[in-house]
Image (spheres, helix red, strand yellow):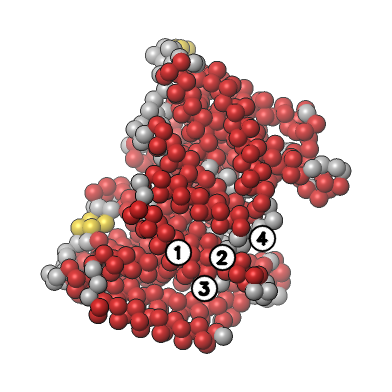
Amino acid sequence: MMGMVYALLGVGFSLTWGVMHVIHISHAAFGLLGAYLAYSLLQHFGVDPVVSAAVSAPLLFLAACGIYQLLIKPITKAREIIVASMILTFGLAIILENVMVLIWKADPRIMTPTYASGALIVGPFYFQHPHLVGFGMSLVGITAVYLFLKKTYTGMAVRAAWQQPEAAQLYGVNLYRISMITFALAVSTAGAGGIGLALLNSFEPHSHNLWLIYLFLVVIVGGVGNIVGTALAGLIIGVITGLSMAFLPFQWVNLVTFGLLMVFLIFRPHGLFKQVV
Amino acid sequence: MEKKRLGALAVITILLAAFPGLNPEVYYLSFMFSVFMYVVLASSWNFIGGYAGYLSFGHAAFFGIGAFATAKMAELFALTPPLAIFASLPAAALAALVALVIGYPCLKIRGPYFAVVTLCFAFVVDLAVKNIEWLGGAEGLWMKTMDIPEQLSRTIMYELMLLLMAITLTVAWWLGRSRLGAGLRAVRADEEVAETMAIPTARLKIQAFVLSAFFPGIAGGLFAYYLTYIHPDVVFNINISILIVLMAMFGGGGTWLGPIIGAVLLTVVNEGLSTFAQAEIARIIYGALFIVVTIFMPNGIIDFFRKKNGRG
């Protein structure tokens, strides 16, 4: 379950990395921002998290367009854009985190929609309703991104820019516009993913650091820029953490996860799956 | 030019060494101590991250290994404080050994993948230390304090860290001019071409990595003595790893002066902000600083001023 939500977060992260060569450190922080917005909407107006995902996604999309124009675009001419983007978005993540501390305080929060206590029991399996909602939301989100990239003209331009930036430019693709759309799309899926994650776990302004590690995990196992791979990797990692939680003492779970990632990186640094564009 | 720099370093070191003679407040000694420490960390990170372009996001691991090994050795052999400080040398050797073992497989992978694998490495070490009772587990380790006035003990730590900084910077200076440094620059520019030109890239990378783990190891040992209490959350803090990278790249990776400027500037700014502003606001300004500097000086401060002087 959790894996799928990480996959939704990871898709955007993977896109910005693949298409723009930007490692977006504040990606998870934007997810957290989405989660907090949904939390407030639920607390004060009783808005369902799924609805607020639909509201916050376009908002974040617009905000991200602004951030791209103001912050990311100027650094695209840097000698090492990956490094410059990491430093810049690290700063952005610090800002977001502390703004969230100022607004929502540092206490852990938990999302409690009306169906929080319900559960679906299928044979020996026990699914809590919020988990199901998070899972469904992620599935819809990932499918939407996938269809966008495969079916629409803009989506094809994004893929073209990722494979051969120069050639795409020759064919009249505006790289800046494409990068902006990619970035904004990534941030809005991050917002939705953050809401999904908030349905499963409690969260606090510092949570995004841990989320970020999982993002790296999902994206690298799935292969950078590979949507389907990212989704599958999310599922696999969900199963691995689930299993290790069942059989190992709690404090060893993360150790196993990171250890696995290390081994993985050393042997298959380019992802588990063959690159399908 | 280069000779002048080394001369300037010597003069500044001597002046700084004389500073405690003015009988300053303990606060300033502690503050300078952390400035020196970050210069050591950022400069030694620069060996692999700056010159070779292999961004290690796990350097706090070496720092932490140094700290924990020193503390554990002091406890095991019941070392008395002056002697125990020397325990940081074998501790640093341990950090270098770990770097050798880790570096061998990890340095084969490049770019962001290397960054992520080192990040994972730092997490694994952190979690492992937390889970091993023998190393204090989640409670951390205590060390014996020196039985002397605070002013004196702080002065000793200050001078030791200053010495370490001078040594690290001399090594960094040497590295910048040596064959090793030249080889590493070639690796950064284009690893395949370097390989074709018969530069033993794999060996050079390992050497640089081991060297860049050694100094943080010593710094960790000194830091353990300085705090007298170490906890995995403090010495393995992921933020230290990230901060080291940022300091070096902020000033300008692959240059001698860059990490020094970055480390001094960021430590001073961070300290200044947290004295004058509310914690969250201070952090927000700190974050904004990263953004502003990257936008206007995307290749680091050093590069920016070089271009300005028309020597880019």
Left or right placement of residue A168 versus residue B52 in this view: right
Q: Earlier in the sequence, mark 3 or mark 1?
A: 3
CA gap, disc 2 and disc 1: 11 Å
Left or right placement of residue B180 versus residue B21 in this view: right
Q: Earlier in the sequence, mark 2 or mark 1?
A: 1
CA gap, disc 3 and disc 2: 10 Å
Task: Identify the amino acid type marked 3.
Answer: Leu
The residue indicated by pointer 2 is B301
What mark, if any, has residue A79 been given in the picture?
A: 4
Q: In the image, what residue occupies the spot 29% across and 72% down? A: B158
Depicted A53 relative to depicted A98: above or below: above
Please, which chain is the residue tagged with disc 4 on?
A: A
- Marks 2 & 4 on one chain: no
- Give coordinates of residue A27: x percent, y percent: 55, 40
Q: Pointers 3 and 2 in contact (CB under 8 A)?
A: no
Q: In the image, what residue occupies the spot 72% across and 27% down? A: A147
